Image: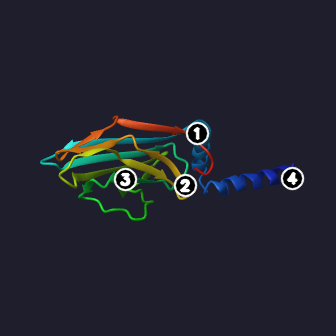
């Protein structure tokens, strides 16, 4: 009986240490892994203002995330200037786009961000439909890339095309 209790104690200690001294974290982690798909949501909305200035609101969500380090980068086409955000030079460059960092914050099982971009067309000409690219990454790899939403400009009037919200689902895996 004592041999069984010693082995059980070592196994329990290993599980306890693996889940960062927090049993609740371990239970939530295993429950997410076994019963929930990982979903990526992107929501964009454009609010018109005076002249050709527009407010582009972007919300990103990683639902039922297992990892702690999620990053989302927004790539806006070069034909548009963003007035209130700095370009994020550490993001992987995409030709014809400027990158901007979304500030992802963990809230229980989700990782959320919301940011407003003040955009204007950079020239007087018409700009055809060009997708806005959003890349979800962690420290190791790119997890999801969304290019559903498209921006266009006609006579300095910016148009956003796309659904109200987009969703992509993936099965949970270790290391994601």
Question: x%, y% of residue 117?
Answer: 27, 52
Question: What residue is disc 3 on?
Answer: 75
Question: What residue is disc 2 on?
Answer: 141
Q: Is residue 80 left or right of residue 61?
A: left
Q: Which residue is rendered at x = 18% and y = 50% of the image?
A: 53
Q: Mark 1 vs mark 2: which is more N-terminal? A: 2
How crowded pointer 2 is (Cα within 10 Å; few <14, some 14-19, many 20+) is rated as few
- Could you give the CA–CA distance between mark 4 and mark 3, rounded to whole angstroms? 59 Å
Contact? badges 1 and 4 (CB < 8 Å): no
Question: What residue is disc 1 on?
Answer: 171
Q: Is residue 158 above or below residue 92?
A: above
Quadrant in which residue 140 is drawn: bottom right
Number of disc labels: 4
Q: Which residue is rendered at x = 40% and y = 37% of the image?
A: 166
- Could you give the CA–CA distance between mark 2 and mark 3, rounded to whole angstroms? 17 Å
Q: Mark 2 vs mark 4: which is more N-terminal? A: 4
Colouring scheme applied when the structure was drawn = rainbow
Q: Is residue 89 left or right of residue 37?
A: left
Q: Mark 3 vs mark 1: which is more N-terminal? A: 3
Question: What residue is disc 4 on?
Answer: 3
In the image, farthest residue toward the bottom: 89
Labels 4, 3: front one: 3
């Amino acid at each position: 009986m004592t041999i069984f209790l010693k082995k059980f104690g070592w196994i329990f200690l290993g599980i306890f240490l693996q889940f960062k001294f927090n049993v609740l974290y371990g239970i939530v982690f295993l429950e997410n892994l076994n019963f929930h798909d990982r979903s990526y949501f992107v929501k964009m909305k454009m609010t018109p203002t005076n002249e050709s200035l527009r407010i582009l609101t972007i919300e990103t969500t990683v639902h039922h995330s297992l990892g702690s380090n999620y990053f989302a980068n927004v790539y806006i086409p070069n034909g548009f200037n963003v007035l209130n955000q700095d370009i994020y030079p550490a993001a992987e460059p995409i030709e014809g786009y400027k990158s901007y960092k979304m500030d992802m914050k963990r809230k229980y099982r989700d990782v959320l961000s919301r940011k407003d971009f003040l955009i204007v067309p950079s020239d007087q000409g018409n700009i055809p439909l060009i997708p806005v690219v959003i890349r979800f990454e962690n420290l190791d790899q790119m997890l999801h890339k969304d290019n559903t939403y498209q921006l266009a400009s006609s006579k300095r009037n910016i148009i956003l095309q796309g659904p109200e919200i987009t969703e992509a689902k993936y099965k949970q895996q270790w290391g994601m």
